[in-house]
């Protein structure tokens, strides 16, 4: 009986460890699943690539992803879906919410890489501040439309003030005075 209990315990432990060893795919703005923090100057454009990585044990057949951002800091401009394996794509924008959806009509996704670029998002830095580009509802499914779980990592866009200032009138007067002195000095040396 002790041998049977030990065998069952060992089998259950091995099964549990094999399940926990299979990490969930990661949805992030980098292909290695790390956090992205972009510091930009007001008026600049920001490009964020939306990746899913960790697809060693599952194939991605479609997705429906909701993203939230601060439109007063980062203004959404456009989205370019990856055309490599996606056939039907949809984009919906409402205030601070962006919804991306796409599906593949391919029957065999076994050659799909372990990391996929889903879309490239373009924002413009509208005002000074910090905008967290964060995930809302996420639905990822395999080639049979069966959903699977995923982890996610948000991105941060930090907009800083434009550091190039406009010269004040005193600066212009000083510049004109210096140019005048140079011309006066040059005219004296030629005499």
Image (cartoon, rainbow, N blue to C red):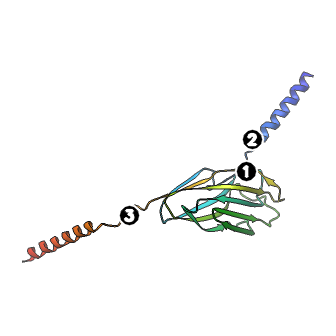
Which residue is at the far left?
191
Which residue is at the far right?
1
Q: Residue at x 84, y 34 (%)?
A: 12
Residue sitting nearer the eye, 62 or 166? 166
The kind of secondary structure element at disc 3 is loop
Judge depth for marks 1 and 2 and give the one in front: 1
Q: Crowding near pointer 2: few (<14 within 10 Å), some, many (20+)?
A: few
Q: Residue at x 71, y 59 (%)?
A: 65
Q: Earlier in the sequence, mark 3 or mark 1?
A: 1
In screen coordinates, is 45 left or right of 100?
Answer: left
Q: Does residue 146 sit above or below 11 in this rendering?
A: below
Judge depth for marks 3 and 1 and give the one in front: 3
User: What residue would you read off at disc 1?
Assistant: 150
**Residue 173, image x, y percentages:** 23, 69
- The disc placed on residue 119 is none
User: What residue would you read off at disc 3?
Assistant: 164
In screen coordinates, is 150 left or right of 173?
Answer: right
Label 1 – label 2 distance at C-alpha: 14 Å
**Residue 85, image x, y percentages:** 73, 65
User: What residue would you read off at disc 2?
Assistant: 21
Residue sitting nearer the eye, 191 or 133? 133
Q: Does residue 42 sit above or below 6 in this rendering?
A: below
């Amino acid at each position: 009986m002790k041998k049977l209990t030990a065998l069952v315990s060992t089998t259950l432990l091995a099964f549990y460890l094999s399940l926990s060893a299979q990490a969930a795919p990661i949805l992030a703005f980098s292909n290695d699943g790390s956090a992205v923090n972009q510091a930009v100057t007001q008026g600049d454009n920001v490009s964020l690539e939306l990746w899913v990585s960790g697809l060693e044990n599952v194939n991605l057949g479609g997705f429906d992803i909701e993203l939230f951002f601060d439109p007063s800091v980062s203004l959404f401009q456009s989205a370019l879906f990856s055309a490599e394996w996606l056939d039907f794509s949809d984009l919906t924008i409402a205030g601070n919410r962006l919804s991306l959806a796409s599906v593949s009509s391919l029957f065999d996704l076994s050659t799909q890489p372990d990391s996929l670029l889903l879309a490239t998002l373009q924002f413009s830095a509208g005002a000074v501040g910090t905008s967290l580009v964060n995930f809302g509802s996420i639905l990822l499914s395999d080639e049979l439309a069966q959903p699977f779980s995923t982890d996610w990592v948000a991105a941060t866009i930090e907009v800083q003030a434009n550091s190039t200032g406009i010269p004040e009138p005193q600066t212009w007067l000083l510049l004109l005075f210096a140019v005048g002195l140079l011309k006066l000095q040059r005219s004296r040396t030629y005499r």
